[in-house]
Amino acid sequence: MSETIENIEKMIVNNKKAYVVAVNVDVIMKIEQDRYLKEISDNADMVLVDGKPLVWISKLYKRPVCQKISGSDLVPMLCETAERKGYSIYIIGGKEGVAENAKIKLEQKHKNIKIVGTYSPPLEFEKDKNEIDKINKMISDVSPDLLIACFGCPKQEKWVYENYKNYDAIVSICAGATIDFLAGNISRAPKWVSNCGFEWFYRFLQEPKRMFKRYFVDDLRIIKLVWKYKKIKDVQI
């Protein structure tokens, strides 16, 4: 985590336009079916592993990942750093009013934080060129150091990839459900639950109807994928 924050700070200091993505089991399953999403992840300036199962799989492949880093852990720590260093933040995503609620909560916690804008775009905004142009202008008008994009995968990754060079923000971070955690709409799993690799089950208990297919149908296919690529890797060796 400390290396992640340090490298993001370097990007800000060097005014290096960049974007950061986080991959979990669900994202990996989407990448397997979506070559464009794979291209986006491959070209990202930083890829974080957000999920204990992927950490375990990395050990099985004998290429262990140092640490699980989720957007919902990273963003609050970046907010602390931003308050201390004077970096500005723009938050985009969520249902109507959620981004603004996240801003209010953060300003209550961090008295000197500089959140220079928020926006919750309408549904299917990514298909509306006028809306995209409007968003890019809103962001450019305030030139944030950090843009926190929370639309869910793959919408946030595709929007950032296609637009991060068109708006004036330095580092764009794809952060998924983080906006709901910041706004207080969804509670985070206790640290010990996350460390044991059961944060997904905690999320499922909170939203069982919405999360059932994702966790118990789509994501379970990762088991087949693990062996598919393990066999390919073994043959290459």
Image (cartoon, grey):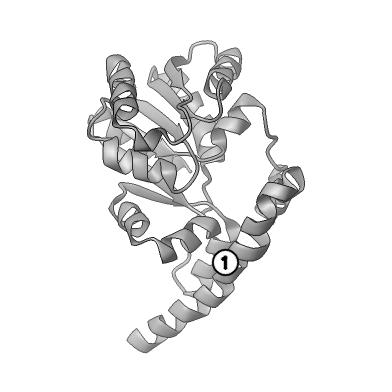
Labels in figure, total: 1
Residue at 34% x, 26% y is 131
- Against 114, is 15 above or below? below
Q: Nearer the viewer, residue 24 or 137?
A: 137
Q: Nearer the viewer, residue 143 or 192?
A: 143
What residue did someone put label 1 on?
Answer: 56
> SS class of the residue under badge 1?
helix
Q: Nearer the viewer, residue 58 or 137?
A: 137
Residue at 28% x, 36% y is 163
Residue 55, image quadrant: bottom right
Left or right: residue 161 compared with residue 222 = left
Residue 237, image quadrant: bottom left
Can residue 7 be seen? no
- Looking at the picture, how far across and down is residue 119, in whole percent? 45, 22
Q: Amino acid at mark 1?
A: Trp
- Looking at the picture, how far across and down is residue 138, in whole percent? 33, 18
- Looking at the picture, how far across and down is residue 135, in whole percent? 34, 24
Q: Residue furthest right?
A: 205
Local crowd at mark 1 within 10 Å, few (<14), some, or many (≥20)? some
- Looking at the picture, how far across and down is residue 182, in whole percent? 59, 28
Left or right: residue 14 compared with residue 181 = left
Can residue 108 be seen? yes
Residue at 57% x, 15% y is 104
- Against 231, is 161 above or below? above
Q: Residue furthest bottom?
A: 235
